Amino acid sequence: DTKNLFQLSDHQNTKRQFNNTVGGKRIGTSVGSKVLGKGGSAFLLDDLNSREEALSNTALQKVNDFYLGTLKNRTNIANPIWLNIQQRIAHLDFSGWLKENENDWYFLVIPTEYTKHFDMKPNPIGWEDPRTTEGELICPARFPEEYYYSIKKDPLIFSSMYQQVPVTLGGNVIKESWIKFYDTEIDTNFFDE
């Protein structure tokens, strides 16, 4: 019977900390907060980056530094549980930084629209995207195609936050479709004049 394993304690019940009746606790903090003297064996990280930070390398790096220099130094065991839940906002947001710098994280990434270009690696829970048709929505009954009409007008937002790919497949600044190739040879002698 797992419903009686523990209860929240009446002695410590604040917005930042909840204790339970068997010695465990949940502590809430935010990026940049002091967590001295506190530690844990399981860490749930929820949207460490805000949308407003997407264009600020300084703000993005502050989050990555908070993880590396503060949170990671507060573990009570050698192999704690880490869970990061996040919409992507930039190439080097926290999830992007983890992919480039930490090798012991698994990533479960579910884009709004299915795309065969998405590189989904095996994950420990065995989840596989059941969609096979390009552009198929993840939950069309809840969010039909019309819901995304205005969101798609900003490809940076749709690509990063909804597709979980901070760089649009066709390019954000210079569109792939703008580049043209020609079969004819161009006379470049006029550059020499």
Image: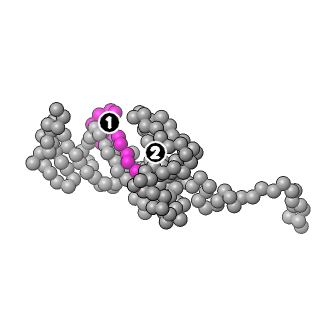
Instruction: Please give the range of residues in magenta.
Output: 73-88
Three-letter amino acid code at the position of disc 1: Pro
Q: What residue is drawn where x is 31% and y is 43%?
A: 43
> On the rendered structure, is 52 left or right of 71?
right
Quarter holding the N terminus?
A: top left
Three-letter amino acid code at the position of disc 2: Val
Instruction: Give coordinates of residue 10: x percent, y percent.
Output: 9, 48
Separation (CA) of disc 1 from disc 2:
22 Å
Closer to us: 37 or 12: 12
Residue located beneath label 2 in the image: 109
State how many labels appear. Answer: 2
Q: Which one is earlier in the sequence, the residue at label 1 or at label 2?
A: 1
Residue 79 figure quarter? top left
Residue located beneath label 1 in the image: 80
Instruction: Give coordinates of residue 168: x percent, y percent.
Output: 57, 55
Residue 4 figure quarter? top left
- Membership of 81 in magenta stretch: yes
Numbered disc 1: secondary structure: loop
Residue 63 visible, this orientation:
no
Q: What residue is drawn where x is 44% and y is 53%?
A: 140
Residue count near mark 1 (Cα–Cα under 10 Å), binned few <14, some 14–19, many ≥20 = few
Residue 144 visible, this orientation:
yes
